[in-house]
Amino acid sequence: MITKRIIPCLDVKDGRVVKGVNFEGLSDVSSPITLAKYYSDCGADELVFYDITASSDGRKLFTDILCETAKSVFIPLTVGGGINTVDDFDRVLKCGADKVSVNSGAIRNPQLIYEAAKLYGDQCVVISADVKRVDGVFRVFAKGGRENTGMEAIEWIKRCVGNGAGEVVLNSIDTDGVKKGFDLEMLEAVCNAVSVPVIASGGAGKIDDFITLFNTLPKVDAGLAASIFHFGEVKISDLKAEMSKAGIPTRLS
Amino acid sequence: MVAIVDYGVGNLFSLKCSLNAIGAEVVVTDDKEILEKADQIILPGVGAFEDAADKLRKTGLDVVIKELAKSGKPLMGICLGMQMLFDKSYEYGEHEGLGLIKGVVKPIKDAVSPEYKIPHIGWNPLIFKGEPSPIFKNIKNGDCVYFVHSYYATECDSSVIATAEYGTEITAAVADNNVFGCQFHPEKSGKIGLSILKAFVSLKEGFVC
């Protein structure tokens, strides 16, 4: 039986891991390579590297760090941030990424998912959507959650999956950084709309939040978080031991 | 020295790094002479069966691999590389494989109920079949490995050394004398995956199981 995945997300800027609350107020945490090794050793099932640099120098540094990480960390690596063209897919896949997540790049050019899926396979393409309630409707936000695209989120995600996205990361802007649990209502709506794996992101504050997530929504495949792992508020080894005790299929290492 | 067959399919960076990490001497090559000199051979692969099988045939590497396998050199196919060891695949049509292991490759979706998502992505425990294979000598029954695939090998009962449960019995690994195949990705399966690779690169030519 397939196990539920726990995925730490490393937001990388100028070669360092940072994580903001509600996408603002960034603070430096640690070296991506050190953190990646640490997480792999303590049982993370996958890692997401998110490139939040804007400059080309920063992008090169990011790619170098990704290559260095892939030389010593042997679990699946997903890369996101600054993915706008098929060449961007090529750049990070060559450095050892297994999956590439697209967000604003797919909003600007919805064909990107189709083209990338045709070249690298559906399993390689992840649609990452930043979603927020606006007047009771789920809307897709672009540019790191700052700009309302006006698109209805469930339709957008269905369209991306139809174009070949093999996995969905759903970031709820409403619950992100609040640490009061995942956005179960939003996640359920997405799980009911698509038949590819769904990764929950935004809102985890404690171990129980993951247990509630997987017990309430068995269709959710994975839980993603950043700062609670980076700051040691939740230890992955403790989290997985508790998940296993609660009867959730878990990979214990 | 372990040789990774380079036939223009997929990215070999992680596989090469994982073999380096266990201290193996690795070469990525499409050169027949180098493959002949290697102690073990790994046939990787991601993407579509037809495209990969065509590329293998166009480069003439299909013949080389068959000869080397018959000579007793340890060979391991990974993911699509494993699927190519079989007689044929029904991925978008019907395509001939290398025929080194008896069996066929079929879509998972035809064998499982619709609530099982395709591709089968994630960590799934290995269920050993029979005596643990020599490539599993450093791991335990129930250890998890990482899968990403939409097709699976079937009608290959006699060679199955491990399965995984995903709505049906998924063939996770096969062995027939010196020829091995892993549907999962050992190079992405953490310490367990590295242990499997380590056991494989310790196998000597002429080894049979």
Image (cartoon, helix red, strand yellow):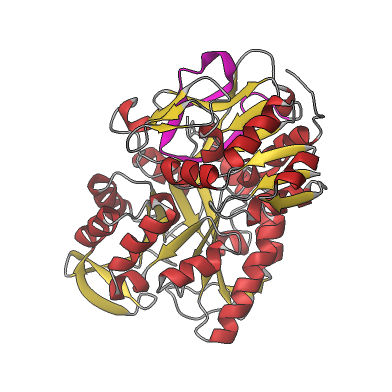
Q: How many marks overall? A: 0
Instruction: Tell me, yes or no, if residue B79 can be seen here.
Output: no
Left/right placement of residue B3 relative to residue A60 reads right
* Displayed quadrant of residue A169: bottom left
Decide: is A244 above or below A158: above
Q: Position of residue A142 (x, y in %)?
A: 32, 75
Left/right placement of residue A221 relative to residue A141 reads right
Residue at 69% from the left image edge and 65% from the top image edge: A68
Residue at 70% from the left image edge and 52% from the top image edge: B28
Between B15 and B115, the residue placed more toward the observer is B15
Instruction: Tell me, yes or no, if residue B174 can be seen here.
Output: yes
Between A21 and B90, the residue placed more toward the observer is B90
Which stretch is magenta? B139-165
* Displayed quadrant of residue B205: top right
Viewport quadrant of the N terminus of chain B: top right
Viewport quadrant of the C terminus of chain B: top right
Residue A245 lies in the magenta stretch: no
Residue at 53% from the left image edge and 79% from the top image edge: A26
Left/right placement of residue A6 relative to residue A221 reads right
Q: Position of residue B64 (x, y in %)?
A: 65, 37
Residue B163 lies in the magenta stretch: yes
Between B158 and B125, the residue placed more toward the observer is B158
Residue at 45% from the left image edge and 79% from the top image edge: A24
Decide: is B136 above or below A242: above
* Displayed quadrant of residue A110: bottom left
Q: Position of residue A118 (x, y in %)?
A: 36, 56
Decide: is B25 above or below B205: below
Q: Position of residue B18 (x, y in %)?
A: 71, 49
